[in-house]
Amino acid sequence: MSLGVLLVEDDKELRNTLRQALQLEGYRVLAALSLADARALWQHRSADEDLDLVLLDLGLPDGDGSAFLAELRARSQVPVLLISARQIEGEKVRLLDQGADDYLVKPFSIEELLARMRVAWRHRGRSVSAAITRYQQADLDVDLSRHRVLRQGAEVHLTPTEFKLLARLVRSAGQVVTHRQLLTDVWGPEYSDHTHYLRLYMGQLRAKLEADPAQPQCLLTEPGVGYRLSEARPG
């Protein structure tokens, strides 16, 4: 199952940008715009919504994010990355001493954020690699960052669900992804047994992306297990 991130940010534009970027990388994102929202999401998360990292803004409409950091550290060792426009050196040191894993000053690049997230997990003994976002094989070219799919050089229109399913396979290109993993990551944990969804959407994807949908070369079936996107073309 993909890693879960709690994003606490009151700026709507930045929150949406970060959420989309994290989802593109394959993370599950719960987004909060206040301390109250963050506390509620943390407290009422289900087993299928377990959280593996918190991105926490400091300047929130109902208080300072440092209060939530203290609450988290009293009961959890989940990695916490602070994001703030504040550049006061003493405050940064204080918050790092109080348990924050890192402190990013706005504005920052998505690439830097993702790298620092991976470092935070690595310090916890968890190895997380950068996600694959570009896939090229035969006459198929998928660029997740540009939300573009080409076949024989022509753009292919995919529905939002078709694109999410293809993106999940791209991020694990060459590896088998089980039925349950695909259903959970694309549709949600409540759909983990709805394998007929997969059969339907895989059929639609093959019809749009394979030269011969009956003899697929890219979107491969692993009988009784799941699906696999064939290895990408080298270089």
Image: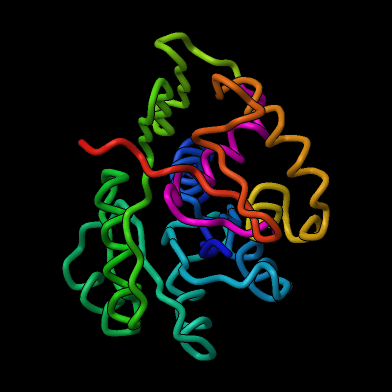
Q: Based on the displayed image, in which of its 4 quarters is residue 143 positioned?
A: top left
Is 234 on the left-hand or right-hand side of 151? Answer: left
Q: Residue furthest front?
A: 215
Q: Residue at x 44, y 62 (%)?
A: 56
Q: Residue at x 54, y 19 (%)?
A: 211
Q: Position of residue 116 (x, y in %)?
A: 27, 62
Is 192 on the left-hand or right-hand side of 52? Answer: right
Image quadrant containing the C terminus: top left
Q: Position of residue 44 (x, y in %)?
A: 73, 72
Q: Residue furthest top?
A: 154
Is 180 on the left-hand or right-hand side of 104? Answer: right
Q: Residue furthest left?
A: 89
Q: Residue at x 71, y 59 (%)?
A: 224
Image quadrant containing the N terminus: bottom right
Q: Residue at x 50, y 90 (%)?
A: 74
Q: What's the magenta region? A: 158-180
Q: Position of residue 214 (x, y in %)?
A: 66, 28
Q: Based on the displayed image, in which of its 4 quarters is residue 130 positioned?
A: bottom left
Q: As rendered, which of 20 and 228 lies closer to the eye?
A: 228
Q: As rendered, which of 186 and 65 lies closer to the eye?
A: 186
Q: Is residue 184 above or below residue 197?
A: below
**Residue 65 on the magenta span:** no
Q: As rendered, which of 182 and 125 lies closer to the eye?
A: 182
Q: Position of residue 79 (x, y in %)?
A: 40, 75
**Residue 173 on the magenta span:** yes
